[in-house]
Amino acid sequence: MDEVWILGGTGRTGRAVASALAGSGAEPVLVGRDPDRLRAAAAEGGHRTLALPDVRAMAGAVAREHPAIVLSTVGPFTTSAPRLVDACLAAGSDYVDVANDLAAVPAVLARHAEAERAGRTLVTGAGFGVAATESVVVRLCDGSRRAVHVRTDMLPSMASDGGLVGEALAGTVLEGLPGVPGGGRFTGRRYRHGRLSAAPIGGEVRELVTPGGDRVRAGLMPLGELVAAQRASGAPSVDCASGAAPSAAARTALRLGSGLLHVGPLRRFATRRLAAVRLPARPAPRSHSWGHATVTWEDGTRSEGWLRLPDAQVATVAFAAEVCRRLARGEGRPGAFTPAALFGPDLATSVGGEFVDPDGADDPGQSSEVRPRPTER
Ligand SMILES: NC(=O)c1ccc[n+]([C@@H]2O[C@H](COP(=O)([O-])OP(=O)(O)OC[C@H]3O[C@@H](n4cnc5c(N)ncnc54)[C@H](OP(=O)(O)O)[C@@H]3O)[C@@H](O)[C@H]2O)c1
């Protein structure tokens, strides 16, 4: 049976993906740093475990043992992905990650030609972030018309179990923008004239009314789905927003603190402090998460689409597991991709997502063309 090595196998995402893969024909192997935590994580499903001290050692083991698929949940992906992709291409393994930052996602996509030569598949962004909005854009942009502008809105709704933020997430938050062209380390990004340019983080807030009737505010965020939406649409102008964008007060604090975060040791200190923050346990704020996109065509008309998904963390696990299952069935192709670019919008429906048209009637077929909604400003 094909082995799927789950790196970060003791974490929230890794453990849940291992359970989701049980009985699927792909054999999960939990890979982590701490033997005790690994044993505890593996106990329920009886999974094989592999204790290795760090990402370097994990990459070495991949190169030696060439598992069929490596799923990485170890952030920051800006540092873990380059090493793991090297190992996978050398070993003949497919690579999947759940990155969603604007530095890591394009860095994996940039390895397309190498992956083609090696005959392997690399999938980056196989989580709610990237897949939720990318699926809507891929569905709307079928190549029959030229898109001139796209705005995506990722509206996660997620319960918190009250755990720690953790090193992987803290590192991803603070390391997600270095080296991205078009702006500074702590400024946002958008596409204008086909190029990345600066944008205000948390700016250009819109209040959206979901097809479920919830009012949600979303502001610009420089995330991996920005690049996925640009590639899927070919639009020269793309904005990417999130319902989890920082508030005005947090943006002010970010502006004041960003000077300090430029200093490496202070940033590492801030990462350790953020990792140790315990999130309050709370229920999901809404019954669904949503991916939303509005595409403006060259004749000035617009199309809008929604994708309804469950709790965003549940959706992340479902997307990552489904991508691994499909790769294990040999459904990948050589190259580097985001998930819906590789598998189409059908990936979202196969994980329980439902495309919903703007008038509220479920419409799994063609997208509907709409006038601007009065709630969008
Ligand atoms: N795309 C999306 O929508 C999406 C959704 C959810 C999460 N994510 C990303 O996925 C990552 C994991 O999230 P999570 O909630 O599962 O985090 P988590 O519960 O903290 O789990 C992280 C895992 O990574 C391991 N790890 C952390 N730092 C490591 C390092 N330097 N070397 C080796 N292993 C390391 C941890 O191992 P130990 O037990 O040894 O600490 C743990 O197993 C985060 O970066 C997050 O941003 C993306």
Image (tube, rainbow, N blue to C red):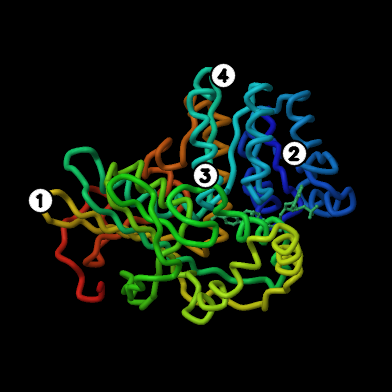
Question: Left or right of 179: which side holds 208?
Answer: left
Which tag, 4 or 1, sits closer to the chain's start? 4
Q: Quadrant of residue 142?
A: top left
**Residue in view at x 73 percent, y 48 percent:** 8
Q: Residues within 10 Å of mark 3 (few under 14, many from 20)?
A: many
Which tag, 3 or 1, sits closer to the chain's start? 3
Residue at mark 2 to residue at mark 1: CA–CA distance = 51 Å
Q: Which mark is residue 29?
A: 2
Residue at mark 3 to residue at mark 1: CA–CA distance = 31 Å
Q: Is residue 267 above or below residue 49?
A: below
Which tag, 2 or 1, sits closer to the chain's start? 2
Which tag, 2 or 4, sits closer to the chain's start? 2
**Residue in view at x 83 percent, y 39 percent:** 50
**Residue in view at x 64 percent, y 21 percent:** 92
Residue at mark 2 to residue at mark 3: CA–CA distance = 24 Å
Q: Is residue 137 above or below residue 162?
A: above
Residue at mark 4 to residue at mark 1: CA–CA distance = 42 Å
Q: Nearer the viewer, mark 2 or mark 4?
A: 4
**Residue in view at x 21 percent, y 47 percent:** 147
Query: Which amino acid does the dot numbered 2 rest on?
Result: Val
Q: Position of residue 81 (x, y in %)?
A: 63, 40
Find numbered disc 2 in the image and state the secondary structure of the residue it sits on.
strand
Find numbered disc 1 in the image and state the secondary structure of the residue it sits on.
loop
Q: Residues within 10 Å of mark 1 (few under 14, many from 20)?
A: few
Identify residue for label 1.
Answer: 299
Identify residue for label 3.
Answer: 105
Find numbered disc 4 in the image and state the secondary structure of the residue it sits on.
helix
